[in-house]
Image: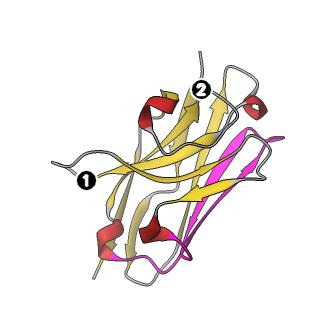
Amino acid sequence: QVQLVESGGGLVQAGGSLRLSCGASGRTFGSNAMGWFRQVPGKEREFVAAISRNGGSTLYTDSVKGRFTISRDNAKNTVYLQMNSLKPEDTAVYYCAAARSSLVTTLQRGYNYWGQGTQVTVSS
């Protein structure tokens, strides 16, 4: 079993920044890729970013490229999502997920553990 706990969400004005954190416990954190997804009520959960087990490879959805940065600290069993230049359309519940393998993927079926989510609200 893996437990994932997100933190760092909140309310921010457009153009502002937030850093989300996801702490992991229960197995060797550094063995698997990690990802961030987000969901708006009434819409499907969507991929945001992913990072390989050693941090050498990352993926981003087009709408966040250049604004968001995913990183990880395997010594602290934590993955981060630095979000800059936030827009109202970034408002969502953000979920951290642990992948089934060491490879980055945008597919939800590639992840088998999920956190509870943290709300991010960007006001205009």
Label 2 sits on residue: 100
- The image quadrant that residue 59 belongs to is bottom right
For residue 40, the mark is 1
Marks 1 and 2, the one that precedes in the sequence: 1
Q: Tell me which residue sits at (42%, 70%) in the image.
A: 63
Q: Is residue 23 left or right of residue 115?
A: right
Q: Of helix, strand and loop, which one carries label 2?
A: loop
Residue range (magenta)? 65-87
Q: Is residue 74 left or right of residue 41?
A: right
Q: Amino acid at mark 2?
A: Arg
Tell me if residue 60 comes above or below residue 77 in the rendering: below
Q: Nearer the viewer, residue 107 or 1?
A: 107
Tell me if residue 112 comes above or below residue 11 in the rendering: above
Q: Is residue 99 left or right of residue 29?
A: left
Question: Around disc 2, counting alpha carbons within 10 Å, would you say few (fewer than 14), some (14 to 19), or many (20 or more)?
Answer: some
Q: CA distance from mark 1 to mark 2?
A: 25 Å
Quadrant holding the N terminus? top right
